[in-house]
């Protein structure tokens, strides 16, 4: 099966592309930067926000895995999440109507957040596209929480609301779930996928501080606002099965690698390893979906 992946350069995209290729699919990866193709991945240039190159990227594909988003906190998110999704759908209808798998966020319809409202509107576009579609809603990625805590660690004291519960999931396992959905018969529906445990903010922060070998006092308080209230009510969590198996502690303290006879695999960084996940990159935003849309290069 030939599959187009948008957001292929994002955190989730860097896990999805090799997962699909390993499953035997021919992967066509969309990027705003020209890249060299290799045996199992064809890189194509395109800009979802402007629509350039999108029709060409969709020719002769059987499915589209739509990961691209401007990310939480980015300005003009609608340019990719809404206008880009519209352009993708229009081009897909004109190029054989491939199956469309769209990634979203658990709680997108239950939390009063601007970014989530944008994702919910993008879901509506997918539902009304006239294509066969699947929407995969995931809980927050380990990587997103990791980066959020890195930003908070710049303060001398970490504000912690013990009443908030999280359900982080590993991007590698989300990539596996996406691959499984692509391999199954197309069916219209919304699928949720979360991590294996609920963890409160206090435990989340203390485990992170230990893993990162940092010392910060924690100030216990109650976060104000409607979004915090929704998180407190566990609207960003799911009891859907199957669920991921890599918990927060296992993400922060990964087991030693199992020796392999495959030298290349053993000496190549995983798409989710620290070597390919710059923790302090201010331009990288991950919130359940995938940032994947690259900023224009400044002259």
Image: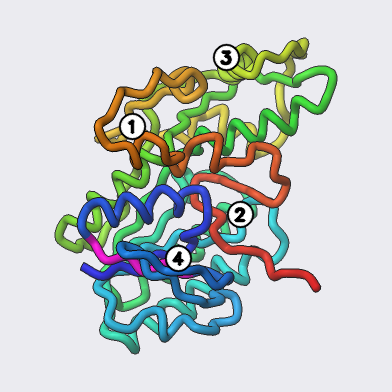
Indicate which disc residue 207 carries: 3
Query: Is 33 left, or right, of 261 in this rendering?
Result: right
Q: Are marks 1 and 3 in contact (CB under 8 Å)?
A: no
- Marks 1 and 4, how far apart at CA: 23 Å
User: Does residue 265 sit above or below 82 in this rendering?
Assistant: above
The crowding category of the residue bearing disc 1, from other C-alpha atoms within 10 Å (few below 14, some 14 to 19, many at least 20), is many
Query: Is 188 left, or right, of 29 in this rendering?
Result: left
Q: Earlier in the sequence, mark 1 or mark 3?
A: 3
The crowding category of the residue bearing disc 3, from other C-alpha atoms within 10 Å (few below 14, some 14 to 19, many at least 20), is some
Q: Residue at x 24, y 73 (%)?
A: 62
- The residue to which callout 2 is attached is 71
- Marks 4 and 3, how far apart at CA: 34 Å
Q: Earlier in the sequence, mark 1 or mark 4?
A: 4
Q: Residue at x 59, y 75 (%)?
A: 49
Q: Main secondary structure of the magenta part?
A: strand
- The residue to which callout 4 is attached is 6
Q: Residue furthest right?
A: 156
Q: Earlier in the sequence, mark 4 or mark 3?
A: 4
Q: Earlier in the sequence, mark 4 or mark 2?
A: 4
The crowding category of the residue bearing disc 2, from other C-alpha atoms within 10 Å (few below 14, some 14 to 19, many at least 20), is many
| Magenta extent | 25-30
Residue 136 point in image, percent of width and height: 36, 52
Q: Residue at x 57, y 41 (%)?
A: 277
Q: Secondary structure at mark 3?
A: helix
Q: Are marks 1 and 4 in contact (CB under 8 Å)?
A: no
- Marks 4 and 2, how far apart at CA: 14 Å
- The residue to which callout 1 is attached is 244
Q: Secondary structure at mark 4?
A: strand
Residue 147 point in image, percent of width and height: 64, 35
């Amino acid at each position: 099966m030939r599959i187009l992946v948008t957001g292929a350069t994002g955190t989730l995209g860097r896990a999805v592309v090799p997962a699909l290729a390993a499953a035997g699919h021919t992967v066509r990866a969309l990027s705003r930067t020209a890249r060299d193709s290799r045996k199992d991945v064809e890189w194509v240039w395109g800009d979802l926000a402007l629509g350039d190159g999108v029709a060409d990227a969709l020719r002769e594909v059987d499915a589209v895995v739509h990961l691209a988003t401007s990310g939480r906190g980015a300005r003009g998110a609608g340019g990719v999440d809404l206008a880009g999704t519209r352009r993708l759908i229009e081009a897909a209808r004109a190029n054989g109507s491939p199956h469309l798998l769209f990634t979203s966020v658990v709680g997108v319809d239950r939390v009063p957040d601007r970014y989530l409202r944008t994702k919910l509107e993008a879901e509506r576009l997918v539902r009304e596209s006239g294509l066969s579609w699947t929407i995969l809603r995931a809980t927050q990625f380990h990587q997103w929480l990791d980066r959020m805590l890195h930003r908070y660690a710049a303060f001398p004291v970490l504000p912690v609301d013990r009443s908030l519960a999280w359900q982080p999931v590993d991007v590698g396992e989300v990539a596996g779930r996406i691959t499984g959905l692509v391999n199954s018969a197309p069916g219209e529906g919304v699928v949720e996928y979360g991590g294996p445990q609920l963890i409160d903010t206090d435990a989340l922060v203390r485990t992170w501080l230990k893993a990162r070998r940092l010392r910060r006092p924690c100030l216990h308080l109650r976060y104000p606002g409607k979004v915090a209230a929704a998180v407190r009510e566990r609207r960003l969590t799911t009891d859907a099965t199957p669920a991921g198996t890599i918990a927060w502690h296992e993400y922060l303290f990964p087991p030693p690698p199992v020796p392999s006879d495959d030298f290349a695999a053993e000496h190549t960084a995983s798409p989710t390893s620290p070597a390919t996940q710059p923790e302090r990159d201010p331009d990288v935003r991950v919130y359940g979906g995938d940032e994947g849309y690259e900023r224009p290069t400044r002259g």
